[in-house]
Amino acid sequence: MRSLGQIRDAERDIDISTRRIAEIGQDIERLVPTDGAAFTMNVTDTSYAGRKEAGRALMKEILTLVQLQQEGEAIIASVGGFDLEYEGQRFGKDGYRYTTMLLRTNAEYEIDLPMTVTPLGAVARLEHALDDFEGEQERYRQRLADARRRLASYQSRGEGEFAFADELADKRRQLVEIERALALDVEDAAAPSALAA
């Protein structure tokens, strides 16, 4: 049964990889270049052409939401054609935590933006997250090829094990015949002692 689980895992990897390759393709189509002078970023309702100003506005917005201990999700910025979502949640008596997520096609990717990051560092982290869609898509293609190889290997092993099914069935028939013969021998051995009594 182990091979059945392996087959299912490989099939699931094939499904996930195929889906992610297509979704990343959609992300690539959506992507608006941010390199050099093409950079623009919207924070709340204001558009910024400078990285430092955009980063400063973004970190100020995050600081405001943290100070208010804002709960729930809110879109706070957009860059490169993708929205950045802030999600805050309270826990315990005085605890609060937040995450910032880049909203992509059917996926959310956390971008670590702690309060200690500089404005330029915040923008660099966002641009880095947008920078490697082709590489990410290629990694899923490799994962897909690997899953297909594994699936073919597991299925061929399954067919090899199944080749002995006839021999196994024959051995089981022989075992049933031996058990019947033993049962008859036990009955025959018990019959004379019953007659003697």
Image (cartoon, rainbow, N blue to C red):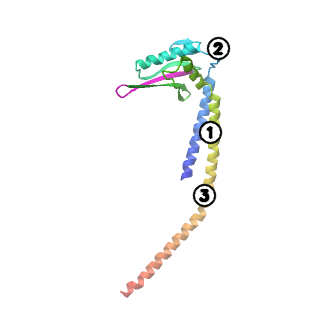
- Which residue is painted at 51% across and 17% down in the image? 58
Element type at mark 2? helix
Q: Does residue 177 belong to the magenta stretch? A: no
* Residue 67 visible in rendering: yes
Majority secondary structure of the magenta segment?
strand
Task: Give the residue number, with chain letter if any, for mark 1.
Answer: 143
Estimate how packed mark 2 is, as few (under 14), some (14 to 19) or many (20 or more) residues with alpha carbons within 10 Å.
few
Q: Does residue 90 belong to the magenta stretch? A: yes
Tell me, yes or no, whether the two marked residues, 3 and 1, touch with CB atoms within 8 Å.
no
Question: Gap in Å between the C-alphas at discs 2 and 1?
Answer: 36 Å
In front here: 52 or 104? 52
Magenta residues span 82-94
- Which residue is painted at 64% across and 42% down in the image? 146
- Which residue is painted at 64% across and 48% down in the image? 152
> Where residue 88 sits in the image (x, y, percent)?
43, 24
Tell me, yes or no, whether the two marked residues, 2 and 3, touch with CB atoms within 8 Å.
no
First in residue order: circle 2 vs circle 1: 2
First in residue order: circle 2 vs circle 3: 2
> Where residue 160 sits in the image (x, y, percent)?
63, 56
Q: Residue furthest bottom?
A: 196
What amino acid is at disc 2? Answer: Ala
Q: What is the quadrant of the C terminus in the image? A: bottom left
Task: Give the residue number, with chain letter if any, for mark 3.
Answer: 162
What amino acid is at disc 3? Answer: Phe
* Residue 43 visible in rendering: no
What amino acid is at disc 1? Answer: Arg
Nearer the viewer's eye, disc 2 or disc 3? Answer: 2
Asked if residue 40 is positioned above or below residue 167 in the image, the reply reads above
In front here: 65 or 154? 65
Task: Give the residue number, with chain letter if any, for mark 2.
Answer: 37
First in residue order: circle 3 vs circle 1: 1
Asked if residue 176 is positioned above or below residue 123 in the image, the reply reads below
